[in-house]
Image: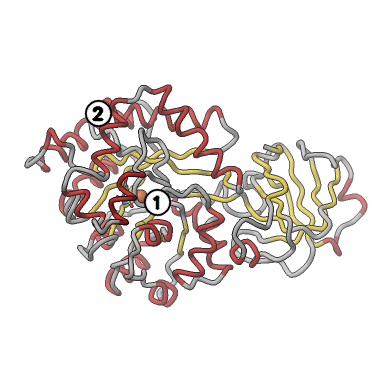
Amino acid sequence: MNHGTDNTLWLNATLFDGLNTREQRMAMAVTDGQIAWLKPMAELNTGDRSGFECIDVEGALVTPGLVDCHTHLVFGGNRAGEFEARLEGKSYEEIARAGGGIISTVKATRAAGEEALFEAAKPRLQALMADGATTVEIKSGYGLSLESELKMLRVARRLGRELRVRVVTTLLGAHALPPEYKDDADGYIRLVCEEMIPAAAAEGLADAVDVFCESIAFSVEQCERVYAAAKAHGLAIKGHTEQLSNLGGSAAAARAGAASVDHIEYLDEAGVKALAEAGTVATLLPGAFYMLRETQLPPIELLRRHGVPMALATDANPGSSPIFSLKLMLNMACTLFRLTPLEALRGVTAHGARALGLQQQVGRLAPGLQADFCLWDTQNPAELAYSVGLPRLTQRIFAGVKA
Ligand code: DI6
Ligand code: FE
């Protein structure tokens, strides 16, 4: 079998297009790294094939390349010891308040050189790619100083240049209060707004800005200042909101025009309505829910009722979600959050792309979008969520080329 260079016509696909599964077997034409057209096999003329190299996938499932719209995969060290402490009964918040948690990763990340951070992050990103990711968002947030935050973002950009994957970067300066700003959260927020955001924007290192809005992190009002600075520099907005408590951070983010709010286990109906009105995506992170043995479920039924698009991501990070598989998230979203397999699949394709503002570029199989797609060893989309470890990814195509 040929491996799909440019000008390729993929025949006999069972096609999940990012929103729905097509009822008929489909043909998909790829030209110059983009999807040129789609047609049911039954409507294909002989002329349609001319100029194309044809590949018959014999009914195999074809999906968009998967989008992981929320990761923290650049970091130093790891937190296996904290995992053990939690097994002995310490909570995530207790560990954070005692200077462990995020701050322990900050120490290791500050100490690491750019090369070491790159080499550590590469296998994590490759693990995501191995089960189908073609677009991955990567946040900073373990530097918490101008220099270290920019260092993390440079590593993320380099990962995108050197591997066959699209990397979107997010400045998460407002992730935690660094020790040198203890008792001066407002001063730290000024550093984020007046130095980090302008520098990241000027150097083209960040596509978006994120915050951790929580009692162990930053208040709604502080997050609003970060959003204003992000907007002033033309950067998109995202928020870690309502993960551990309900502070109204999601509604505030939505009012500020956030592309997505993420976690949202404690989101209430007023918050859901605010997302619906603003067109903000709700990003579900079942890996953190699972690792922290959270019991508060995100308000899935309310999100459905108000028509809020649900994205699904790994939150890959050293503390609350050391998990580097989007396919596992499909399963967890169904088993833990009771999403349907179709909803889960939309979450890692069309809606994941929307959470990154990339809905016109990736996440769906439609004419004009980048030809990022996956072939799977099954004909049934539900099997991607149903089974763990299988079905196999048989081909991963990035910008029209096998990658
Ligand atoms: N919420 C999370 O789940 C990650 N960050 C955040 O704000 C966890 C980060 C960590 O524990 O290192
Ligand atoms: Fe996160």
The image's mark for residue 146 is: 2
Q: Mark 2: give few (<14), some (14-19) or many (20+) Cα within 10 Å.
A: some
Specify whether 391 is left or right of 205.
right
**Residue 128: where, in percent of width, then height?**
54, 44
Which residue is rendered at x = 54% and y = 72% of the image? Answer: 340
In-front residue for pair 230/387 = 387
Q: Nearer the viewer, residue 217 or 276?
A: 217
Q: Amino acid at mark 1?
A: Ser
The residue mark sitting in front, 2 or 1, is 1
- In the rendered structure, are the residues bearing label 2 and label 1 in contact, judged by CB atoms less than 8 Å apart? no
Queried on whether the Cβ of the residue with tag 2 lies below 8 angstroms from ligand 1, the answer reads: no
Residue 42 in which image quadrant: bottom right
**Residue 13 makes an appearance in the image:** yes
**Numbered mark located on residue 321 in the image:** 1
Going from N to C along the chain, the mark reached first, 2 or 1, is 2
Q: Amino acid at mark 2?
A: Leu
Is there any visible trace of residue 349 in the rendered image? no
Name the residue: 27% across, 35% down.
106
Q: Nearer the viewer, residue 136 or 208?
A: 136
Left or right: 43, with 30 as reference point = right
Q: Is mark 1 within 8 Å of ligand 1?
A: yes
Q: Secondary structure at mark 1?
A: loop
For label 2, the SS is helix
